Image (cartoon, rainbow, N blue to C red):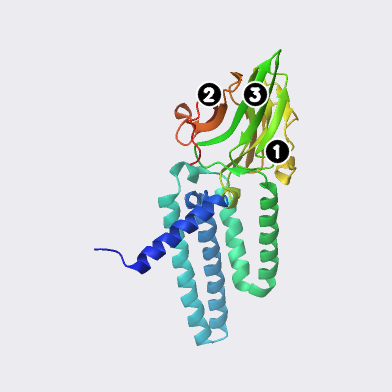
Amino acid sequence: MASSPLAAAAKSAAAEAAAAMREAGFRHLPRAFENPYLWTAIGAFFLGAALGQVLRSFRAARLRRARAEARASALALCFLACAVASGAALLVLAPKAALADGLLPYWAGFAALVGLAADLAPRAAGIPLCACALIACFTLASGVAGWLPLSGPCAVARLFPYTVGEGRFLGELELYERDTVPTLQRLELPLERAALVVERLELGGPLALLAGARRYRVVGIAGPEGAIAATFPARVSLLDRLAALPAATLGEARGPFAVRRREASEALPLTPLEPIVFAFVADEDAGAGALVLTASTTERAPRGP
């Protein structure tokens, strides 16, 4: 049976909205439903709210307010049902290995206290809680500014040498997606082999809910031994301070719910007018979902997830 024009229009609008979200960097949202911190926070919040309604019911019973007691009891059951539904979603959607996170109980306790406070004192607690949430979101958004979402295999950059000789090359570097580095820039470096240097940011816990689990940015060009020959200016953010890395070196730094890693691809020999494509590809040896930065002289690198 042919679909109606209204259904076709709705399907087209949904596809356009999904494309717009991908362009805006929200590719991680479908995977957010697998994050145990999401369902733990929702379930614990409603559990705390249910406890608040139980306390209201006891108070109404002491004051012999039958209508208030019935209302509080009904709301407590509704909130409890929401908590149970969130717990079921946690068990079904979240990976089983993620449930062993030792910070989940503390996160649940915090969310339960927030739900209890919001239920018992919605005006007194609501404004501070909203202010804290806005500050946290603003800080996180500022921290990941300049970092591109990394949701799957994708091409990162293309290096096109014009001339190579006497230990130097002249060419241009083209980025497939814009971060804090211009998408096209001219380079002249004392290299005959070149590798791309990127920084990867792996977020966990509640940070991954809003910003995605993985992000990256291009930071420089390196030689065959990993020595960085050229660095590109990057915006300094709070995450850079929480997980600081020494300048012009490869390495890894860990912070609260964040791992920052600077790595280089394989260094390939430069040949005039022969482009090198740098891309993240699936690393089957490292497990499902793992990505590795590669360099290739073919143009058939993946352009996006």
Instruction: Tell me the residue at 57%/26% (across/down).
Output: 275
Task: Give the alpha-carbon distance from disc 3 to disc 2, as whole Å.
Answer: 15 Å
Task: Choose the circle earlier in sequence order: 3 or 2.
Answer: 3
Q: Circle 3 is placed at which residue position?
A: 162
Q: Circle 2 is placed at which residue position?
A: 297
Is 267 situated left or right of 168 in this image?
left
Q: Nearer the viewer, residue 136 or 82?
A: 136
Against 120, residue 304 (above or below) is above
Against 127, residue 194 (above or below) is above
Task: Choose the circle earlier in sequence order: 1 or 3.
Answer: 3
Horizontal and vertical percent for residue 63?
Answer: 57, 85
Against 268, residue 121 (above or below) is below
* Amino acid carrying mark 1 in the image: Ala
Q: Secondary structure at mark 1?
A: loop
Is 303 situated left or right of 160 in this image?
left
Residues at discs 2 and 1 in contact (Cβ within 8 Å):
no
Q: Nearer the viewer, residue 96 or 11?
A: 11
Residue 217 image-quadrant placement: top right
Residue 243's tag is 1
Instruction: Give the quarter of the figure containing the N terminus.
Output: bottom left
Q: Residue furthest top?
A: 166
Task: Give the alpha-carbon distance from disc 2 to disc 1, as whole Å.
Answer: 34 Å
Task: Give the alpha-carbon distance from disc 1 to disc 3, as whole Å.
Answer: 37 Å
Against 248, residue 118 (above or below) is below
Horizontal and vertical percent for residue 145?
Answer: 67, 47
Q: Secondary structure at mark 2?
A: loop
Horizontal and vertical percent for residue 124?
Answer: 69, 72
* Amino acid carrying mark 2 in the image: Thr
Q: Nearer the viewer, residue 202 or 118?
A: 202
Asked if one can make out residue 304 in the rendered structure from this viewpoint, the answer is yes
Instruction: Tell me the residue at 59%/71% (across/down).
Output: 119
